[in-house]
Image: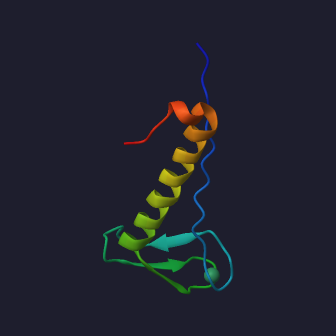
Amino acid sequence: MSNTNVDIPVEIHCAKCGEKSLSTETMQDDSPVTCSNCGARIGCWGDVKKAALQSVAKQIKKKLKDDFGDAFRPQ
Ligand SMILES: [Zn+2]
């Protein structure tokens, strides 16, 4: 048995300063997310979460396609 580590970077960052450090108080879908470096408003938590999930899903699909090629067909 061998373990495979897949590195999946989630690229959500501040449009103003480029910092990847976000902060939110409650992690509710409608709570505001701000940059913890410059304080700029990024959006609401629901949107940030959705963008992160989409980014991860896209990278997983690409990784599987690279590894398995045509043998892997996502439904
Ligand atoms: Zn910022």
Give the tally of numbered discs.
0
| x and y, in percent, of residue 52 in the image | 48, 61
Of all residues shown, which one is farthest toward the front? Answer: 70
The colour style of the image is rainbow
Residue 16 found in image quarter? bottom right
Locate the N terminus by quadrant. Answer: top right
Q: Is residue 65 above or below residue 36?
A: above
Left or right, 68 with reference to 18 = left
Look at 54% across and 71% down and name the residue there. 22
Residue nearest the viewer, comparing 1 with 45: 1
Residue nearest the viewer, comparing 14 with 39: 14
Q: Is residue 25 visible?
A: no
Q: Is residue 13 visible?
A: yes
Q: Is residue 43 above or below residue 24?
A: below
Left or right, 18 with reference to 61 = right
| x and y, in percent, of residue 12 in the image | 57, 68
| x and y, in percent, of residue 62 in the image | 58, 47
Residue 32 found in image quarter? bottom left
Look at 63% across and 69% down and name the residue there. 20
Left or right, 73 with reference to 35 = left
Look at 56% across and 87% down and name the residue there. 40
Locate the C terminus by quadrant. Answer: top left
Ligand 1 falls in quadrant: bottom right
Of all residues shown, which one is farthest toward the top? Answer: 1
| x and y, in percent, of residue 65 in the image | 57, 40
Residue nearest the viewer, comparing 68 with 18: 68
Look at 66% across and 74% down and name the residue there. 19
